[in-house]
Image (cartoon, rainbow, N blue to C red):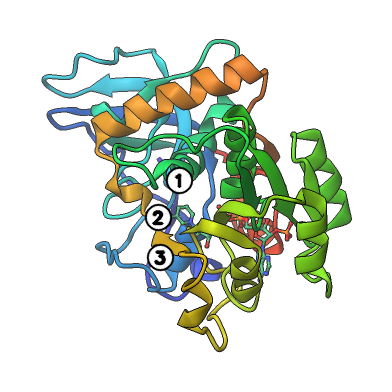
Amino acid sequence: MRAWLMDSFAGVEKLRLGEVEDPAPGPGEALVRIRFAALNPADAFLSQGLYPAKPRLPHILGRDGAGEVLAIGAGVENVRVGDAVGILRCDAGVNIWGTLAEKTVVPAASLAPIPAGWPLEEMAGAPLVFLTAWQALTQWSEPEAPPVAGQTLLVTGASGGVGVASVLLGKSMGLTVVALSRSKEKGAKLKDLGADFVFDPADPKLRKSILAAIEPRKVDLVVDSIGGALFNQVISVLGYGGRISVVGRSGGEVPQFNTATLFFRRNRIGGVTVGDYTPAAAQNVWKQIVERLDAAGRRPVVDGVFPFEEVPAAFGRLSQGPMGKVLVRP
Ligand SMILES: NC(=O)c1ccc[n+]([C@@H]2O[C@H](COP(=O)([O-])OP(=O)(O)OC[C@H]3O[C@@H](n4cnc5c(N)ncnc54)[C@H](OP(=O)(O)O)[C@@H]3O)[C@@H](O)[C@H]2O)c1
């Protein structure tokens, strides 16, 4: 089969389109023909050695995808040959070969049916970012639970995969959503997706603008993909008991972080790791996500689909800041 092979930890620019033997499913696994694969920033990080996983080389990146089951291994009962499926977050593309290939083998427990009426491409890019957004929104209760309706959610990097998922899920939970995007055009699309307010993170009066918009409330919860210089401003708009779910750090290190900014409003910061979901937990959460999207008449957002030969250009698009998910079609 054709696949994009990673021969070194020298970045996605060094990926090579080559031929490898078709993988075969072992017990509990399924072989899936990938019709659409989706890119994630984690693929680029892994390809530069900036990710905890160090898979054997050559590796095949790609954590998300959708297609049909071509073969199943012993003991697989939840899917049959010919089923259309999507991959819920698992080890594919991390420690085992991933979806930037014509075929991939994944644990059958991490396959989910395509929700009724969804085209394959909408499924292909959704699971990883929606599961991440779900954890970011619900992790502050034990057991995990959505925030109380009427609270205010701030989403940084809102046009990205996790950002769009956070906006859509946040609205489904009855939250007031404030979204940040550097682009006016993407800001308008975020409004169409239900964001109540959209601001440019570079606005010199960002704090004032956000607080004036949501007055008399302050921000209850943040899903933050950016960190960097924005982080201190994010803390400054939190209300009493406000929480920040830290998902990513596209903006780099936080300069001059003063822990005292957390004291008086008892603010809390917590990391998010989508990898913490077991296959069973991911299936359970994914079902709730699909039900919420269907009930709201919303769908995952696809930024664009690149031909398989154009994976480097697709990574280029991802690094510019897409609107939703960047896909490739093997
Ligand atoms: N912790 C976890 O389990 C987990 C899971 C999934 C993803 N992540 C991480 O979360 C982050 C976001 O993932 P994603 O899939 O949503 O990424 P993405 O699709 O690339 O989107 C990120 C968005 O952030 C904005 N952005 C990018 N660089 C920026 C910068 N330097 N300053 C300000 N804004 C910037 C862009 O929006 P605008 O152009 O509209 O401003 C972009 O659309 C990544 O770092 C990823 O690795 C973590």
* Callout 3 amino acid: Leu
Quarter of the rendering occupied by the N terminus: top left
Select label 1 or label 3 by which is in front. Answer: 1
Number of dots carrying numbers: 3
Please tell me which residue lies in front, 227 or 56: 227
Secondary structure at numbered mark 2: loop
Q: Is residue 101 visible?
A: no
In the rendered image, the vertical position of residue 309 relative to residue 79, given as above or below = below
Q: Are marks 2 and 3 in contact (CB under 8 Å)?
A: no
In the rendered image, the vertical position of residue 65 relative to residue 54, given as above or below = above
Q: Position of residue 320 (x, y in %)?
A: 71, 63
Work out how far the residue at label 1 is from the one at label 3, CA to CA, in angstroms: 18 Å
Work out how far the residue at label 2 is from the one at label 3, CA to CA, in angstroms: 18 Å
Q: Position of residue 270 (x, y in %)?
A: 40, 60
In the rendered image, the vertical position of residue 276 relative to residue 73, given as above or below = below
Task: Indicate yes or no: mark 1 CB to ligand 1 under 8 Å.
Answer: yes
Q: Residue tagged by mark 3? A: 46
Badge 2 local density, few (<14 within 10 Å), some, or many (20+)? many
Secondary structure at numbered mark 1: helix
Q: Residue tagged by mark 1? A: 132
Residue drawn 60% across the image and 37% down it: 170
